[in-house]
Amino acid sequence: MPIRSIKSQIRTPLLLMGGLEVAILFSSLYVAGAIVFGSYSECLRLLGPVAPKAAVISVVAVLSLSAMGLYQFHQRLYFSESVARILVGLMFTCLGLAIFYYLFPAAHIDRDVAIVAIGYVLVLLLLVRYIFFRTVDHHIFRRQTLIYGAGKRATSIGEIRRRADRRGFKIVGQIAAAGDHNMDDREELAENGKSISELAIEKGADEIVVAMDDRRGNIPVRDLLDARLQGIDVIDLLEFLERETGKIRVDLVSPGWLIFSPGFRRSRLRQFAKRLLDIGVSGSLLLVGWPVMLLAALAIKIEDGLTAPIFYKQCRTGRGNMPFNVLKFRSMRQDAEMDGKAVWASKNDNRVTRVGNFLRNTRLDELPQVLNVLGGQMSIVGPRPERPEFVSELQENIPYYSERHVVKPGVTGWAQLKYSYGASEEDAIEKLQYDLYYIKNQTLLLDVLIILQTVEIVLWGKGAR
């Protein structure tokens, strides 16, 4: 993953918290063994090599906690919600370890040691999370940001209103720039004969965000260079918004920025690794999920009759604007579109059946799409495939919409994680901005993170319709 993409997802507070939690998880076996057996030496004698077993526990637990959304910097959770997610995450950890120990009996640990280790981990994880919640929304870890610009483009920073979304930065001042339009009434720093670098140092700024409305002949190159040489980062507005929001603002972007911006890289190795991930994940889902799929098919038949179809095939637009038939469990009535006209799904759509409502809320209606993935028409991670009727309309009205079709559509994706189910052109614009971020920054690591976080979507019902 590009370095800037990593920084947008993994911040200093998360690194500190994650490091502490990994240390807690790794040490749990040592501490529990010493408590149960009376001494560290006796623990080593009875348990054997502890480090490999502790490493397995740490990896399984971190994956489980990540799947609960507990390592998302902009996640807006109350402490009580975090407690619930930690408990569910530890339950998944125990399940994962049980499977691992069944496959590798030599790695098994004593039951009493396991019980003490779970208690030790639970108490300390809750303590670390409590401290995190008390400190992360303060200014300790935030970048001190000076905005150069006070016009229309600069207002996009003020549109980041959620407290959780502003955890990464604190605005220490704003300087009006030549060429700014529609300046608002916010208080700007008066230059008073001082250079931008002097004002940045005076305000303790870590970075200067260039958010001018008109750059032609107006960029203070000397001042910005002086600030850069003083160790203060100078970044473009779009780069700042991409880092803080995880999306690319299509209303601010230009073709030149897309051309020269880092990212959008392709390589045969990357495509090969992604295909291996697709086959591995979809094959595993099919192997593990076939009993659930069988029950879903049975439920559809019971509700709608033995002659009712189980699956629903629908034409969607794939990579390179090529059409394909996506396969899903049928969740709507058979007469949902009797006139043949494509209709956006809406909240509380009365066309959805009772079984279909459950399948949609749990995302189980998407399971048959693993066959599309195995067939190479889709990927596990990518933009959501849309119907050709909608695509034609959206490409006419939304700039850069066709760019989302340079990659395969996905069963899950960055936009699906970050935004609720789209049911309008406005929603399509919002989701496109997340899709462009994914296309620009896609790597195997980002795909794995999205797959893990999809578990959170399924368990906690975010964004389903």
Image: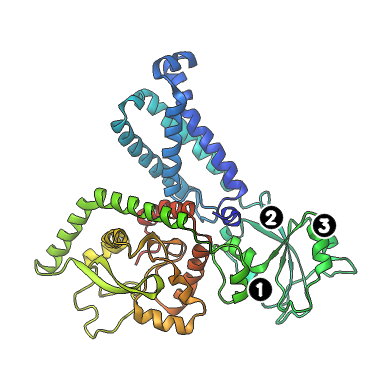
For label 1, the SS is helix
Residue under the image location 67 percent in, 78 percent down = 152
Quarter of the rendering occupied by the C terminus: bottom left
Residue pointed to by mark 1: 155
User: Is residue 437 left or right of 332 when viewed as pictured?
Assistant: right
Q: Is residue 31 above or below residue 70?
A: above
**Residue 201 badge:** 3
Residue pointed to by mark 2: 143
Q: Earlier in the sequence, mark 1 or mark 3?
A: 1
| Observer-nearest of 160 and 80 | 160
User: Is residue 329 left or right of 211 when viewed as pictured?
Assistant: left
Residue under the image location 50 percent in, 39 percent down = 126
Q: Earlier in the sequence, mark 1 or mark 2?
A: 2
Q: Amino acid at mark 3?
A: Ile
Quarter of the rendering occupied by the N terminus: bottom right
Q: Amino acid at mark 1?
A: Thr
User: Is residue 75 left or right of 363 when viewed as pictured?
Assistant: right
Q: Residue furthest left?
A: 306
